[in-house]
Amino acid sequence: MTIILGIDPGSIRTGFGIIKSDKNKLSHIAHGTISAKGKTVSERLHDIHQKLCDIIAEHNPVEAAIEEVFMQINVQSALKLGQARGAAMVALAHHALPVSEYSPREIKKTASGYGAATKEQMQFMVKTQLSLPLNPQADAADALAIAICHSQHRAFLSRITTQ
């Protein structure tokens, strides 16, 4: 059994999702968003770091996965996203969690079967795979999809290394 933390970094809302992977079975543990709207950049980054540290301490994941930064046309948006991602990575490093990184297309392809899936399709697929009663909020759904993607990549790698 492995507990995996998925993180969808954002400068306003950072999604997190925690799942348990036990052989071929996935179970939902928790999900949510860290909202930092209306705060200064330094306060936002501190909140992301501190709240992720609290989540890690509460749920004790043993591995983490995070979305890679994708190309942005707006340089300011890319910088803010990179800062949020950095705050999350520092929290993961603080707890000595191994981190895997996945591109948005890879996450969508692995979690939904379609690399260009919409937000709504991702929410539905996450809800279905984890037997959730309702679609999770978009950022949390993305974070859960990142954790699902990591779980499936781990399973594949363990199969090919044991053969």
Image (spheres, grey):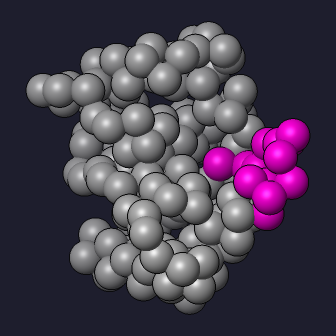
Q: Nearer the viewer, residue 64 or 17?
A: 17
Up/down of 37 relative to 10, above or below: below
Identify the residue shown where x is 83% and y is 46%. Answer: 74
Q: Is residue 161 visible?
A: no
Q: Position of residue 30 (x, y in %)?
A: 25, 53
Up/down of 107 relative to 33, above or below: above
Quarter of the image for residue 91 reads bottom right
In magenta stretch: residue 132: no
Q: Position of residue 97 (x, y in %)?
A: 56, 74
Q: Position of residue 6 (x, y in %)?
A: 48, 52
**Bounds of the magenta segment:** 67-79
Q: Classify residue 31 as left or right of residue 122.
A: left
Q: Position of residue 15 (x, y in %)?
A: 43, 52
Identify the residue shown where x is 65% and y is 48%. Answer: 67
Q: Classify residue 24 as left or right of residue 107.
A: left
Quarter of the image for residue 75 reads bottom right
Quarter of the image for residue 76 reads bottom right
For the view shown, which residue lies furthest in the front direction?
A: 38
Q: Classify residue 156 as left or right of residue 23.
A: right
Position of the C terminus by quadrant: top right
